[in-house]
Amino acid sequence: MTLILFLLAFVIGPAAFFVLDRRGGRHWPLALLAAVLVAAAVILSNVDAVGSEVAQGLLSVLLIWVAWVLVMVLAARALRRILARTQGERWVRVLGAVGTTLPWFGFAVSQWMAR
């Protein structure tokens, strides 16, 4: 389980960030999708589903994490708009990709505190 979360946080998250950040276009679809994912996660965590509570909780956390990656893309686009004429554009992309890994550190701290 820890390996899967590690791969999600450090491989899939930054890769998804770079793929979504490269595409120009409108911002509202990403914002809408992030809001829908968070709403779905909240609804899923409060509804008694047929599956196990562990699977339901993991799916809810996964939906919130995907929404986090989308929010990082939106934040990077906003910062890039502000720093359009400086050398900061590269740093915005790097920091955005690193920002997608922040939930991993929360998971690691919670595991450490639980022991």
Image (cartoon, grey):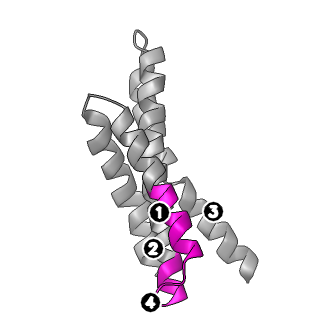
Query: In terms of sequence position, does the residue under pointer 3 or pointer 2 come before the other?
Result: 2
Give the alpha-carbon distance from disc 4 to disc 3, as whole Å. 26 Å
| Label of residue 40 in the image | 1
Q: Magenta stretch?
A: 37-57
Specify whether residue 97 is in view: no
Q: Is residue 2 left or right of residue 84?
A: right
Towards the viewer: 42 or 110: 42
Q: Write the residue at 44% across / 53% down.
A: 36
Tell me which residue sits at (51%, 56%) in the image. Answer: 38
| Residue 106 numbered tag | 3
What residue would you read off at disc 2?
A: 59
Q: Residue at x 42, y 22 (%)?
A: 80
Alpha carbons under labels 3 and 2: distance apart: 17 Å
- Rendered view: 75 above or below 35: above
Q: Quadrant of residue 12?
A: bottom left
Question: Relative to residue 109, is residue 4 drawn left or right?
Answer: left
Please state the horizontal and vertical placement of residue 93, each as a whole percent of the image: 40, 34
Between circles 4 and 2, the one closer to the viewer is 4
Which residue position is annotated with label 4?
51
Instruction: Give amino acid for label 1.
Output: Ala
Q: Write down the quadrant of residue 37 in the picture.
A: bottom left
